[in-house]
């Protein structure tokens, strides 16, 4: 298994981030509650959850691109020792593409159909780097396209002349235009075929190694997480269910949701085993259960789960789960959470 | 099982779509080879999985089976009867027995109709059960068989009030109400949340047990197939390249395309990060097909003769077929 | 998407979203005023315009007074009463002509959009031809050649005003036809008629409703124009006819502004009412108009006192 350098510095540190959605005439909906994680240089952090678990809200909060009724109500987003939430909109605009770039799910919608791909990448370079020398810009566009495996001769083509996989590559090239340190990849392979998905995952892996990129990989596909990620944050109903390194999540999960999710996920290496589904449906934001948000679907729920939301307990060093059942094993007080990023090796 | 009369049999089915590439000087007739010489049988109570990437022709094949597209060549048999060119009443009659479950439960339900009306619609279309009470009873039975219990909770609601999994159950109920013999399920779980998928798959599997329905399961995801298909057919560029029992295809894949596809399926276990065979490039355009074996330009084990000879369909192990010169 | 689905499937939900559109509410109010005026004309109007009046020279273009709040016209009739009764013709023409337009337009649009192929080609080319022929001169010619009765006018306005609706309905039909539930209906074995009735029509209907309201305003305007040009049923008093009479019978030289302003105001009022109401309905019924806004920078971060704590 790949290991991250011992002294890799922490790039992004999110502390107790909470986001509400204001609803006219009602209590605000708590879309995110106390999210904590750390992202080191060269680390791939998988953010996993089902629809409505808050993973998209988390991404948008990090980028400060929430819809008009979204409010970040508490917490810090420290990026290289600056709290992004303290920045002015203008400074944030600079951070957005130069330091933290985003790859979207639907590449067709994110590319403008009336401009050539090369021109769209050039625009990203010019806007954020203030380069005006035409030759330098063209060289950079070619360099970026080659980096993602697109021949330079295709820079003057339009998005509709690209296949789905090529478009996603072009999106990645665009995200890399300003040499960001962190790339947020929001379901980058969801609409793609498995073979193209494998190509894109391989490309992201190569880019991480080559450029030292840190990647926040948002997905619902546990298989992709197992292949790509170093650490995993499992979200459910806007809260952290479990946070640990990838091996622990898959082989020694503590939160019942993680356990059930793994049992519900088809595994090619174990055919003919019966799939177990989790009864019920993920909670809707406007109807969150009291107490633990997973309790109504949890096979191990007991009285306390329905009234009291469990805090994030440290199960072990570098392993966190928010479940009343893991509390007795806690050896780290919840007030001073020790996050995986702080240890030497993952 | 094989002595039984198959419920569906395809013989050399071919579906070409003409493309107009007319220039001012020359008019060249070209075709998209969506489905090209496909034959297989589906037995009663069997689950056959049709696996392939987008553009391999699996959805066209389903539409052709439903008689929503007319085949260019070949024959379709339903319970031994040639139904390829049926029309009018006999076609209506035949359609009752083959029902389809679509990929997108958000799109395949009319948002202006109630759940009860949606499930009753097939009965209205086929003028079955003119008695209101009897119709109602059948709708209730279909909804409850699809796991929406009690049905009275759902009858008067609209699709947008239901979750994705519940909507897919409504689609299934709408198919079950006609008591079909075959279900064509086109990627029925790919739009659903992981925790819900298993329950829809298990529902489809249980329908086979309780009602003896055969399922043709069309998907790109070998992972979900592994759980309940009896046999797997792998399609590439309009053709079936490998077909066999689920376990033998998964454990001893013969065709290099199947091998590559299996190797890149993400496995939810980080300790099993395997050597992946990543095919470069993308599936070629089905208009200008490669010569010889259609897979040779991307095949990791291609030999010179693959460029000339179109491989024949051979039974390599008992009941395990493949079309490749190198196996 | 799901929000708009709520609004189109239940009347209460529809009203809830419609209430949010201030323009729509104003339009609805203005529209109701005209309708009530037309319905209760005999009760509201102080005089009956058809009544034979004995006129003296002082009654012609008499200025507003306690007896005649808005003065009298060239024949000594009460302008206010004429105005109130005139709304009836405008509304009758507006409603019936727009129903004809919408009926033809929806039929052509749905047939062209749903069946495609040659039917679509022929119908849409015909629509295009109708679209480029200027309505008004054609209407003038037809009305002039036939007897300018109320029903002739309704028919002419209706028969010329459907092109816009046909194009709109066609494009919506094309969009709905692509949706998966239509494919699902086909796979059940449903025929074209069933699909149009159960799936296409209900999805196109909101658009048709919006369009009807907008076409009403066009029809009212067209009727007024024709009447103003003197091509109206002489027995049916309408706002356009009032304008025509005032214009051709010396209201200008008599400085009788009241004879011109009131019918003009009525036309503007009715047209504006329909336009606003149509826009309000469109915001509710047409999902494509929904816009999403991003919060602006700093206001998005609202950490309150928790940071210091």
Image (tube, helix red, strand yellow):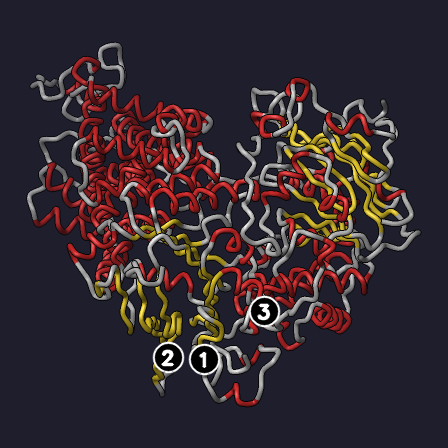
Identify the mark at residue A227; answer none if there is no mark.
none
**Which mark sits nearer the N-terminus, 1 or 3?**
3
User: Which chain does tag 3 point to?
Assistant: B
Residue B59 location, x and y as percent? Answer: 40, 61
Question: Circle 1 sits on which residue?
Answer: B288
Residue in the image at 80% along x and 52% along y: A43
Mark 1 to mark 3 CA distance (whole Å):
25 Å
Going by the image, does A241 lie left or right of C150? right
Mark 1 packing: few (<14 Cα in 10 Å), some, or many (20+)? few
- Specify the subunit that label 1 lies on: B
The local secondary structure at tag 1 comes to loop
C216 on left or right of A205: left
Labels 1 and 2 touching (C-beta < 8 A): yes
- Residue B304, horizontal then vertical, whole percent: 56, 89
Is there one chain holding both mark 3 and mark 2?
yes
Say what secondary structure mark 3 lies in: helix
Q: Which residue is mark 3?
A: B259
Residue nearest the observer in this picture, A309 or A133 = A309
For image coordinates 71% across by 38% down, the residue present is C297
User: Sequence-wise, which precedes: disc 1 or disc 2?
Assistant: 2
User: In terms of secondary structure, where does tag 2 sit?
Assistant: strand
Could you tell me if the residues under marks 1 and 3 are in contact, i.e. CB atoms within 8 Å? no
Comparing labels 1 and 3, the label whose residue is closer to the camera: 3
According to the image, label 2 marks what residue?
A: B30
Would residue C41 be seen by someone viewing this image from the given angle? yes
Q: Is residue B327 above or below residue A260?
A: below
Viewport quadrant of the N terminus of chain A: bottom right
Q: Is residue C133 visible?
A: no
Instruction: Residue B295 in the image: state x and y as whole percent.
Output: 52, 77
Q: CA distance from mark 3 to mark 2?
A: 32 Å
Judged left or right of residue A35, residue C66 is left
């Amino acid at each position: 298994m790949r290991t991250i350098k011992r002294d890799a510095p922490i790039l992004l540190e999110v502390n107790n981030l909470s986001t509400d959605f204001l609803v006219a005439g009602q209590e605000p909906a708590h879309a995110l509650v106390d999210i904590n994680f750390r992202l080191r240089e060269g680390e791939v952090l998988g953010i996993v959850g089902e629809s409505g678990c808050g993973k998209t809200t988390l991404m948008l909060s990090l980028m400060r691109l929430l819809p008009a009724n979204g409010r970040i109500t508490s917490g810090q987003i420290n990026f290289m020792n600056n709290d992004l939430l303290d920045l002015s909109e203008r400074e944030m605009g600079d951070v957005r593409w130069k330091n933290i770039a985003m790859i979207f799910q639907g590449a067709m919608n994110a590319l403008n159909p009336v401009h050539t791909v090369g021109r769209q990448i050039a625009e990203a370079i010019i806007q954020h780097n203030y380069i005006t020398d035409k030759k330098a810009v063209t060289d950079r566009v070619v360099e970026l396209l080659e980096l993602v495996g697109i021949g330079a001769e295709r820079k003057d083509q339009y998005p509709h002349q690209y296949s789905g996989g090529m478009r996603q590559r072009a999106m990645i090239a665009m995200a890399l235009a300003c040499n960001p340190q962190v790339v947020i990849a929001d379901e980058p392979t969801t609409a793609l075929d498995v073979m193209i998905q494998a190509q894109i995952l391989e490309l992201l892996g190569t880019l991480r190694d080559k450029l030292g990129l840190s990647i926040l990989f948002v997905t619902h596909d546990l298989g992709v997480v197992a292949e790509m990620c170093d650490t995993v944050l499992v979200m459910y109903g806007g809260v952290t269910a479990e946070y640990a390194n990838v091996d622990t999540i898959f082989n020694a999960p503590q939160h019942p949701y993680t356990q059930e999710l793994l049992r519900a996920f088809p595994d090619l290496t174990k055919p003919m085993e019966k799939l177990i589904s989790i009864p019920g449906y993920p909670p809707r934001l406007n109807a969150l259960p009291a107490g633990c948000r997973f309790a109504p679907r949890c096979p191990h729920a007991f009285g306390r789960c329905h009234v009291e939301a469990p805090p994030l307990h440290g199960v072990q060093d570098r392993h966190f789960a928010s479940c009343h059942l893991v509390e007795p094993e806690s050896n780290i007080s919840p007030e001073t959470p020790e996050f995986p990023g702080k240890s030497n090796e993952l | 099982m094989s002595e039984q009369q198959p419920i569906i049999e395809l013989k050399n089915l071919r579906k070409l779509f003409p493309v107009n590439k007319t220039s001012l000087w020359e008019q060249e007739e070209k075709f998209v080879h969506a489905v090209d010489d496909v034959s297989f049988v589906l037995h009663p109570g069997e689950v056959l999985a049709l696996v392939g990437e987008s553009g391999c022709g699996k959805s066209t094949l389903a539409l052709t089976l439903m008689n929503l597209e007319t085949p260019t060549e070949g024959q379709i048999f339903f319970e031994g009867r040639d139904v390829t060119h049926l029309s009018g009443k006999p076609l209506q009659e035949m359609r009752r027995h083959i029902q389809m479950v679509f990929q997108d439960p958000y799109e395949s339900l009319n948002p202006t109709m109630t759940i009860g009306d949606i499930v009753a619609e097939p009965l209205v279309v086929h003028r079955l059960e003119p008695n209101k009470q009897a119709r109602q009873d059948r709708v209730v039975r279909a909804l409850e068989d699809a796991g929406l219990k009690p049905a009275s909770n759902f009858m008067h609601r609209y699709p947008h009030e239901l979750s994705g999994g519940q909507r897919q159950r409504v689609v299934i109920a709408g198919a079950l109400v006609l008591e079909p013999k075959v279900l064509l399920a086109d990627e029925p779980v790919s739009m659903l949340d992981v925790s819900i998928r298993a329950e829809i798959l298990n529902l489809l599997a249980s329908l086979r047990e309780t009602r003896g329905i055969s399922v043709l399961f069309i998907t790109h995801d070998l992972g979900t197939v592994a759980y309940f298909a009896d046999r797997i057919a792998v399609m590439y560029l309009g053709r079936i390249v490998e077909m066999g029992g689920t376990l033998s295809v998964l454990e001893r894949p013969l065709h290099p395309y199947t091998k590559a596809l299996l190797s890149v399926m993400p496995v939810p276990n980080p300790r099993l990060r395997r050597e992946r065979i990543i095919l470069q490039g993308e599936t070629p355009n089905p208009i200008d097909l490669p010569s010889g074996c259609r897979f040779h330009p991307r095949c990791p084990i291609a030999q010179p003769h693959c460029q000339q000879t179109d491989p024949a369909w051979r039974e390599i192990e008992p009941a395990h077929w493949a079309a490749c010169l190198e196996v | 998407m799901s929000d708009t689905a709520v609004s189109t499937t239940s009347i209460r939900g529809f009203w809830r979203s419609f209430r949010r559109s201030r323009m729509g509410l104003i339009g609805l109010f203005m529209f109701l005023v005209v309708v009530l005026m037309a319905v209760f004309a005999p009760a509201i109007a102080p005089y009956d315009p058809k009544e034979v009046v004995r006129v003296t020279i002082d009654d012609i273009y008499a200025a507003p007074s306690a007896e005649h709040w808005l003065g009298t016209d060239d024949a000594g009739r009460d302008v206010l009463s004429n105005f109130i009764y005139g709304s009836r013709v405008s509304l009758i023409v507006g409603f019936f002509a727009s129903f004809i337009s919408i009926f033809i337009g929806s039929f052509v649009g749905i047939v062209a959009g749903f069946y495609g192929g040659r039917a679509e080609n022929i119908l849409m080319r015909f629509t295009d031809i109708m679209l480029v022929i200027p309505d008004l001169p054609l209407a003038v010619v037809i009305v002039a050649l036939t007897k300018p009765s109320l029903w002739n006018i309704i028919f002419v306005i209706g028969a010329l005003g459907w092109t816009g609706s046909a194009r709109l309905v066609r494009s919506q039909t094309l969009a709905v036809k692509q949706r998966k539930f239509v494919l699902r209906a086909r796979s059940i074995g449903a025929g074209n008629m069933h699909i149009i009735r159960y799936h296409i029509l209900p999805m196109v209907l909101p658009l048709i409703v919006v369009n009807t309201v907008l076409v009403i305003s066009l029809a009212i305007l067209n009727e007024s124009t024709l009447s103003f040009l003197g091509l109206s049923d002489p027995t049916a008093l309408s706002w356009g006819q009032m304008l025509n009479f005032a214009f051709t019978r010396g209201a200008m030289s008599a400085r009788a502004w009241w004879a011109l302003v009131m019918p003009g105001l009525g036309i503007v009022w009715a047209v504006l009412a329909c336009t606003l109401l149509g826009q309000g309905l469109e915001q509710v019924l047409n999902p494509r108009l929904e816009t999403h806004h991003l919060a602006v920078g700093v206001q998005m971060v609202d950490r309150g006192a928790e940071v210091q704590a």
